Amino acid sequence: MRLPRLFPAARDALGADRAAQALPAGRSAMQTLLIAIVPVLLPHLAHLPGWCIAFAGLMFAWRAWITWADARGDAALPGRLLLLFLMLAALAATLYTHRTVFGRDAGVTFVTVLLSLKLLEARTRRDVVVAILLSYFLILTNFFYSQSIGTAALMLAALWLITAALIAASRDAAPMAPARLARLAATILAQALPMMLLLFVLFPRVQGPLWGLPADARVGVSGLSDSMSPGLITELSLSDGIAFRVSFSGVPPRGADLYWRGPVLSEFDGRNWRASAPNPMRPARFEPAGAPVDYEVTLEPSNRPWLFALEMPTRLPAFGRLTADLQPVTDRPVSARLRYTARSYPGYRALATEESADLAPYLALPPRSNPRTRELMATWQLQNADPRALVERALRHFRTEEFFYTLEPPLLDNHAVDEFLFVARRGFCEHYASAFVVMMRMARVPARVVTGYQGGEINPVDGVFTVRQSDAHAWAEVWIAGAGWTRVDPTAAVSPARVERGLSGALPQRFAAPLLSRLAGDWGAQWAARARLNWEALANKWNQFVLNYSPDRQRETLERIGMKAPTWQDMVAAMSIGVGLSVLAIAAWILKAARERDPVKRAWLSLCRRMARRGLPRLPHEGALDYAERAAREMARRGMPAQRAAALREAAAAYAALRYGRESATVTPARFARLARAV
Amino acid sequence: MPPPVHPGIAPLLDQLNRIILGKDRQLRLALACMLARGHLLIEDVPGVGKTTLAHALARSIGLAFQRIQFTSDLLPADVLGASVYDRDSGSFTFHRGPIFAQFILADEVNRATPKTQSALLEAMEEEQVTLDAASHPLPQPFFVIATQNPSYQVGTFALPESQLDRFLMRIALGYPDRAAERELLTGADRRAAAARAAPVLDVARFLALQEGAAAVFAAPALIDYLQALIEASRRAPQFTSGLSPRAGLGLLAAARAWAFIGGRDAVLPEDVQAVLPAVTAHRLRPAQAQEHASPTALVEDWMTSVPLP
């Protein structure tokens, strides 16, 4: 097999003779390229502006028509003036849409448009090669938006097709059959694989998001926020997006203990809950008790400076700390996937050492709001003012009265808590938590809302817990003298199943719970659930080992293979050596592949090599019989035994008969192999 | 050990070897050329036995023999024949020329004018003579041995390449070696021996041998080698142009005949190499820088540069 010549175009382009540049296989190259562009641009449809999709689609369709259906062939391509006009119009539209041609979105839009126009002026091989290189670049741009396994697989397919187009464009002879083209492209990519792996492992890494892109790479991440308004968590619960993954080093805690603590909200304006400004002077205090739980969290980027940990964490990574509200945070927004280990004590004891001045913010309420609730709480307070009794009474109220846990709560007006408690009586966890905290504050019991995630789903394939946005939850904490901040989950009173079995267990089927969480609960669709679990295990591996291959991980990996404290210079050196070796190995493999496949010829060549080592080389053009004759004479001259010359003659005659003769029963490859060995 | 011979050809070859001494290889080439239905050009200095060889061949196979001595005043009609007015019948009748024979010896063909040369060569190619809009087919088998003196001799018209291409082979006889020379000097007259030679074959058996030669098997691997050779000749810097497709076909036919004479039913690369100089040396024009090199040496260079596939 020969290595394909990839860029004869570079030579051709220098010559002035345009006829020499014309592609003999141009049509086949253009067809392959047009097919290859489909997977490249498919994911971009989601974020390209509408005019760009329409424009580029029209141009591609035009080019496809000319390539497949127009008898005039390339003569039907539009003139330069029209293309220039279209290009300027596209540039103007890009500028109008994005206000720039730089940056991720504008860049992708403009390159897409340019590619579509380039195809329309591609007459020579050089033009086609330029279009192919542009397509390679467009493959890269897809990873600006998504780095999932699916995207990677699709782009691999695109890479394969574009490489096939490049091979088609590089051919001087007649077009290749599509199957051969595909096979050759796959071979070339397979040969590039070791180099790719080496570069991946050894290329010095930098910390940060994948491409260090401008701010537009960080928008549109869904997740918890630092305020809570009715409906926020309801919205999140419709999302299958993953918040973080956890792998426990021991036995995972019970589902009811899986409260992943996030933002603590204590300021209420009658409708929205907000976090209070952090007070760095107040320390976080609680007492670890019970058995500790160790685990590792892989946090998806949220663009928030929050970490999530099981209540209550004692050990956080170096970059994390606990606020006075016992919320785990970090210094910078999490813009790339983050991995950390933590230790928590689910059976912790809070400390009842707060000063009453410190508790004041947890009693604040907007004035003159929710009069009916205020009235109700006043009655309850008269009957029993003990905070524990009030908490019990409120929970019993939720449990015994007609309250419903629903994803379709009615809209509430200004006195939201009144409305919820006395009229609507339907809500999601944020409604219950919010109403409960307001009720407690009215009864002069300090209380606050804690948001975070509850539960998670264990993947039996790899034992990893996946916590999704749909696991977002809000609960309450009340301060009880002598016991400190105590967790109360009013949702559990209304719908115990929410805490025990997750969201899909708590909602009737008709509610629009995310498709995946419904499937997981559906006994009849167990295979789908299992497939999903396997997929998620794979996706987790992908995240851990491919996307999250950070400087730390790189150092770990390299130290494991024996590089002590590698610097970037070491990595570059190792990379150069490795790439050099892999190129040599591939070259050796190709040369070996060029080795003879016909066993008869191989045996003959091996015989000739053996003879050459004894000083009787066969000349390259020498036929078997001539060679045997000459070698026999030479052997006789050296006084070697005549049997050996005879054996060589016999083997040579058998070879000649096998290779050049008609098929015969007397001379078989096996017999020849025997004769050849006997020499 | 002498190379093996096909049993049907051995008596013929033996007889020829008795008449032409020490030229086994040239005799085999000449025979291979006849078996491959090609025409032979013998180029050598006068007096090395060209005519004797032609005589011996014709008589041994039992073919009707005609000799045409080419001179500078020979006209096409002297070769082909002419229409002569017959006073009795009042019409023109065609009088056949000496070319109407099965075996023609065109002696010293390069002495004739180009016009006469081309009359002969066209008849060879078409195997018929066309005169006054009437075609007169030549007898079968039809075989021409042309001899010519090397073209640097005085008073000759060298055959142009287009004409040379019509000869399947060009061979040179060369001087005899010492032993053959001595036998030549002490023994009987060779021409007389050739004239006395009894036919060892008849025409029917000769035609059967021709068919046998054409049926020799050429394996795909051999065709690969042939193609590699032809492609290399087209790229080789020592030639201005490579082998034509006709030359390629001729090469295969000659190699088949050579294998057949050797008693084999399949062509080997050795067979191709054996006939290669004779079949190709007169068709390949040396590049300017190589003008003074021997054509045979150039062919040798080219052949050794192509490895067996």
Image: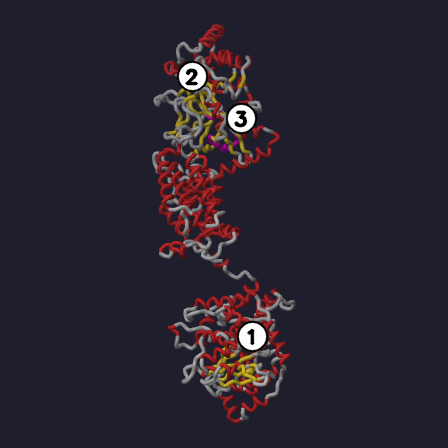
Q: Circle 3 sits in a helix, a strand or a loop, which is it? A: loop
Residue A2 in the image: above or below residue B139:
above
Q: Is residue B29 above or below residue B234?
A: below
User: Which residue is drawn at the image coordinates 55% and 86% (left, top)?
Assistant: B55
Q: Pointer 2: residues within 10 angstroms few (<14), some, or many (20+)?
A: some
The kind of residue on which mark 1 rests is Ala
Q: Residue at x 44, y 27 (%)?
A: A223
Report which residue position mark 1 lands on.
A645
Mark 1 / mark 3, whichever is N-terminal: 3
Q: Which mark is residue A513?
A: 3
Range of magenta residues: A243-260
Query: Is label 1 on the same chain as label 3?
Result: yes
Q: Secondary structure at mark 2?
A: loop
Instruction: Find out whether residue A255 is within the magenta segment.
Output: yes
Q: Are marks 2 and 3 in contact (CB under 8 Å)?
A: no
Residue B245 visible? The answer is yes
Picture layout, residue A361 above or below residue A556: above
Along the horizontal axis of the image, is A486 left or right of A401?
left
**Circle 1 chain:** A
Q: Are marks 1 and 3 in contact (CB under 8 Å)?
A: no
Q: Are marks 2 and 3 on the same chain?
A: yes
Determine the CA span between mark 1 and mark 3: 87 Å
Residue A2 horizontal/vertical position (percent): 47, 58
- Distance from Cα at disc 2 to Cα at disc 1: 105 Å
